[in-house]
Image: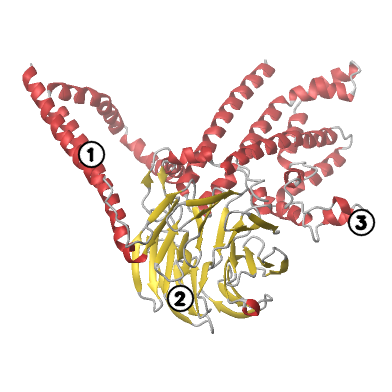
Amino acid sequence: MHVNPGRRRLTTIVVSRVASTLVLLAVLLCLPPMRTAADGRVNWEHEFGDSVLSIAASADDSVIAVGERDNHLYVFDMEGNLLWQYLGSNSIVSVDVSDDGSLILAASNDAYLRLFARDGELLWEFKGPRAFSDCAITDDNAYVLGVSSLGSTITMLTRDGAEIWTRNLVMPVNCVDVYGSGDSVRPVIGLNDSQVRVLNKDGDQLLAMRLDAHVLGVAVSANGARIAAALDNGKLVYANGANGQILWSYDARRPGTRDRMYGVSMSADGQVVMAGASNGNVFVFDGEGTLLQTTKASEVPVQATFVSRDGSLLMYGGQDNVLRVIDRAHFGSRIAGEQQQRRNILIGATVGMAVLVGALTFLFSRTEWGRRTWHVALAPTRRILASAWRARICYLMLLPTVVLLLILNYFPAFSGLFHGFTRWTPGLRAEWIGLQNYRDAFRNPYLWVGVKNTLLFMGAGYIQLLSPLLVAELIFNVSSARAAYWWRTVFIFPMVVPGVVGILLWRNLYDPNYGMVNKFFELVNLSQLQRVWLGDPKVVLGALVFMGFPWVGALPLLLFYGNLISIPTDLFDAAKVDGASFLRRFWHIDLPMLLTTIKTLVILGFIGGIQAFGNVYLTTGGGPGHRTYTPALEMYYQATRFSRLGSAAAIGTLLFVVILTGTILNIKYIRGSATEFEA
């Protein structure tokens, strides 16, 4: 059928004009709403390179400190001007600012507490035994406190950095706040055993409140009369600081989700309480428990909040990498504008998609070219469906197996691949962000440290293959069959012991206080060689490599020994007739015959090295600092510690690509070698 060229041009013009109009409408809807200053109060935001982990400010809000996961401490004035910044060697997990703004305290994952002057001068730094999780400065600037969830300790120091005492509380200590001055200083701590404890100046317990979940955040009023606690089960609890009586609580969980309540802060009089949640919500209460404001501030967890001393200024930030400072009187309208902007973006995307679908439908249904293309394109599909219908009984019998494989094997894999392109937090809508997670992964310093450590561990693992090879040779060359049997049993028996048990055993051997390694050096009068083996950056990698000595793994031993006993005895007889020594026979007969086994172990070591996780997580947790990070450990922390499953999925996809590429290359090489040997 001949189509009139004039009509075709008219149709094209009409479609393009309609599409342009709708796209312009979508762009206008996506424009952000205009914002005005809040009656002279500051109203600003600052975007960082990584998650905001902690916020604190002076009494007059003239000094605002922010701790960031990307190792930075930032200090702003009340108008949002950056005064100075400090780059540490690990995440700045907590900050505090003295009331007069003269001191800024920072706690980091490299196990350091650092105290700065207002102008950014580093006054001192204190090295703790494990990474700190929170810190606080007393009202009179006389003392500072730091707590460690990994070390289960609380430490009090003088303003000059001298340690007064350290208490080990057995359970991980997640958070701390403090009130009072002089001898009336009262630290308030939150623990993993669901308790909030009030201590005296000497670290003795004065009051304990038993709650119903891990305490992730704690805040106390200036006089200690009110205590607020953020819990792992999504609750915010507000209690009487004198007797521990719970005055009110709020449950932020939504049905079917496991939301957490993160950062919590309150005004000096305890009459304004602010908390952030893992679902991206921010809550503001008064002292009676009345919910003043609640809003969806972000699509990702809000981990840090701060209320000014007078309760007039609100600050919050989290995994969207943005610090927002908002006057409380205008908090609701500001957030409503941001929500409207997100809705406009969604509407614009929907309109654009509708335009695209409409244009394609018009082309394929109203033109001869479109109808012809539609039928030609569907022809192969129709043939496949017809063939499947003829064999429908066979496919029906295979359906249960295929469904189970899709659900249990392929769906998690493809879900991880898809969510690597999203900002995804469990229970929340996954927001498509394209390649942002992959760009963040390549800029992630922890991941690059992990890559270097992985190469080190893999290289050491390949060298350690010499141990099972030599043991297999020794057992193979034992003349007595009974002796060979018992030697095999002795070396293979550890295979029945769970690997976790072996790792924990080595952790105890390395313990600096009662571990056998330090005790041995003490026994032989070599005390100068004693170390905090898993806490010293200079020796920790070597200590991890040495774990498992003498490195006789059961699987490599079985593979080597099984291959040795399969070698034809004619080769050994011929070597004996020729007068070959053991070393000559090993080099020219045993080693070439074991080549395929060695290459198999190389590829297994490659896969295991890329996925290395358990030994590091159970011993150092990636520390000291980020010295022993591995890519798998960073992926685990992104998913569990920071609830950034999209970022974790991106890292997992990158590891999958590396493992798949290396495995394919090794498999091809192994096959070629085996074929050549058999020939």
Give the CA separation, mark 3 to mark 2: 57 Å
Q: In which quarter of the image is the N terminus?
A: top left
Scheme by which the image is coloured: secondary structure
Q: Amino acid type of disc 2?
A: Gly
| Residue 1 appears in view | no
Neighbour tally class for label 3: few under 14, some 14-19, many 20 plus, Cα within 10 Å: few
Q: Mark 3 points at which residue?
A: 523
Picture layout, residue 174 above or below residue 649: below
Marks 3 and 2 in Cβ contact (< 8 Å): no
Picture layout, residue 121 above or below residue 575: below
Q: Amino acid type of disc 1?
A: Gly
Q: Is residue 349 left or right of residue 9?
A: right
In front of the other: 413 or 641: 641
Give the CA separation, mark 1 to mark 3: 77 Å
Q: Residue furthest bottom?
A: 243
Q: Mark 1 points at which residue?
A: 352
Mark 1, mark 3: which one is toward the viewer?
1
**What is the x, y in percent for residue 236?**
45, 70
Q: Mark 2 points at which residue?
A: 270
**What is the x, y in percent for residue 370?**
17, 24
Locate residue 278: give its quadrant: bottom left
In front of the other: 456 or 667: 456
Sequence-first tag of 1 and 3 = 1
| Residue 572 appears in view | yes
**What is the x, y in percent for residue 387?**
29, 28
Q: Amino acid type of disc 3?
A: Leu
**What is the x, y in percent for residue 490?**
81, 46
Picture layout, residue 185 above or below residue 76: below
Residue at 52% across, 79% down: 223
Mark carried by residue 651: none
In front of the other: 103 or 477: 103
